[in-house]
Image (cartoon, rainbow, N blue to C red):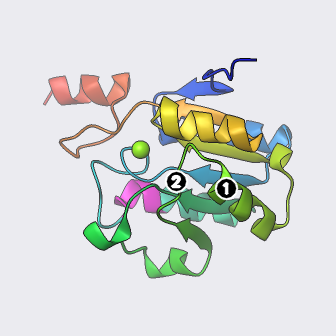
């Protein structure tokens, strides 16, 4: 049997996802990829918009994790102090191998049906989610110039100024 690379859903960016709907569908934990999903390139900190989004999700009762393949010794990363104690962060995740996702899911004390993985790469994020038995949302990679996610709306704003 072939493992499909089709995500459960697609979105322009993490800011275009209806998290309230996911909650109604039973999602309790949200696993984010880091690079080009929550920020441009390899950010050393989250852009303000992403920090606000994660705080909002935590305040709404979601469990939130960042699961990155980044090798931390080459690029450091620090989370906003408000988030540090509340967000599970795992580097060197080895996606698409599903072991890190599975560890995070079991450490959160939930089942894989209650998890969604969100990321910009089919062959790591979406495939890892498939292999771990979770749903996934593919987002477009955050633009390299760092001004925002590569969404149509942002693109239009950029054209106008
Ligand atoms: Mg990525």
For the C terminus, the image quarter is top left
Q: Is residue 98 above or below residue 48?
A: above
Q: Is residue 78 visible?
A: yes
Q: Residue at 84% across / 37% down in the picture? A: 25
Name the residue nearer the viewer: 47 or 65. Answer: 65
Per the rendered image, the range of residues in magenta is 46-51
What secondary structure is the magenta-colored segment mainly?
helix
Q: Are marks 2 and 1 in contact (CB under 8 Å)?
A: yes
Which residue position is annotated with label 2? 94
Q: Quadrant of residue 47?
A: bottom left
Horizontal side, residue 82 vs residue 135: left or right: left
- In the rendered image, residue 124, in percent from the top left (x then y), is placed at 51, 39
Q: Which corner quadrant of the figure contains ligand 1?
A: top left
Q: Which residue lies furthest to the left in this view?
A: 161
Kind of element beneath mark 2: loop
Give the answer, above or below, for where 62 lies relative to 144.
below
Where in the figure is residue 12, as x and y percent of width and height?
46, 28
The residue to which callout 1 is attached is: 99
Judged left or right of residue 53, residue 107 is right
Say whether mark 1 is within 8 Å of ligand 1.
no
Q: In this view, does 50 lie to the left or right of 43?
A: right
């Amino acid at each position: 049997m072939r493992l499909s690379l089709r995500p459960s859903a697609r979105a322009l960016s993490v800011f275009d996802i209806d998290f309230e709907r996911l909650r109604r569908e039973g999602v309790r934990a949200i696993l984010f990829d880091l690079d080009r999903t929550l920020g441009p390139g390899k950010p050393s900190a989250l852009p303000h918009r992403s920090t606000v989004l994660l705080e909002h999700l935590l305040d709404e009762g979601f469990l939130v994790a960042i699961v990155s393949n980044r090798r931390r010794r080459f690029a450091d990363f620090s989370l906003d102090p408000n988030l540090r104690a509340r967000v599970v962060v795992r580097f060197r995740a080895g996606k698409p191998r599903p072991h890190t996702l599975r560890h995070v899911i079991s450490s959160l004390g939930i089942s894989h049906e209650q998890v969604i993985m969100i990321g910009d790469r089919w062959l790591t994020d979406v495939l890892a989610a498939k292999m771990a038995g979770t749903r996934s949302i593919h987002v477009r990679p955050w633009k390299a110039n760092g001004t925002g996610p590569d969404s149509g709306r942002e693109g239009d704003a950029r054209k106008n100024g």
